[in-house]
């Protein structure tokens, strides 16, 4: 059951981050497309890749702050 709790936490955290950073990436893509004078080929994919990398890193950081290597919840500071 412990792994299921970590999995649910990771999914929730990743989804929240993805919505936030995908929105930022979408707005940046729109801005880039409106300012670009030539053809757009690979640049929007870089924004998507950066969004995914940031979301994964932030999720992993959140997991490591709340759970130890064995999957036990760490004591939080109040």
Image (cartoon, helix red, strand yellow):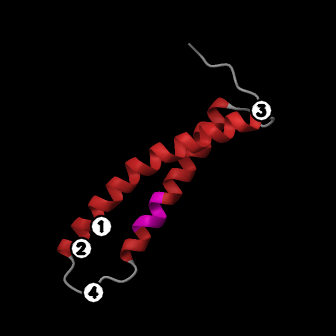
Q: Residues within 10 Å of mark 1 (few under 14, many from 20)?
A: some
- Label 4, label 1: how far apart the Cα atoms are: 13 Å
Q: Which quarter of the figure has residue 25? A: bottom left
In the rendered image of this protein, does residue 11 appear above or below residue 67?
A: below
Callout 3: SS:
loop
**Proximity of marks 3 and 4: CB atoms separated by less than 8 Å:** no
**Residue 10: which disc?**
none
- Label 2, label 4: how far apart the Cα atoms are: 9 Å
Residue at mark 3? 1
Sequence-wise first label, 2 or 4: 2
Quarter occupied by the C terminus: top right
Q: Residue furthest bottom?
A: 39
Nearer to us of marks 3 and 4 is 3
**Residue, x 66% and y 37% (percent of image)?**
64
Nearer to us of marks 1 and 3 is 3
**Residue, x 27% and y 59% (percent of image)?**
27
Quarter occupied by the N terminus: top right
Residue at mark 1? 29
Secondary structure mainly formed by the magenta segment = helix
**Residue 33: which disc?**
2
Segment colored magenta: 47-51
Sequence-wise first label, 3 or 4: 3
Q: Which quarter of the figure has residue 11? A: top right
In the rendered image of this protein, does residue 22 appear above or below residue 10?
A: below
Residue at mark 4? 39
Location of residue 28 in the rendering, given as x and y in whole percent from the top left corner: 28, 62
- Label 3, label 2: how far apart the Cα atoms are: 46 Å
Callout 4: SS:
loop
């Amino acid at each position: 059951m412990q792994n299921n709790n970590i999995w649910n936490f990771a999914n929730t955290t990743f989804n929240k981050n993805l919505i936030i950073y995908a929105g930022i990436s979408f707005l940046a893509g729109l801005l880039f497309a409106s300012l670009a004078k030539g053809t757009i080929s690979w640049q929007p994919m870089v924004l998507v890749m950066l969004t995914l990398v940031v979301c994964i890193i932030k999720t992993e950081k959140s997991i490591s702050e709340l759970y130890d290597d064995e999957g036990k919840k760490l004591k939080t500071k109040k």
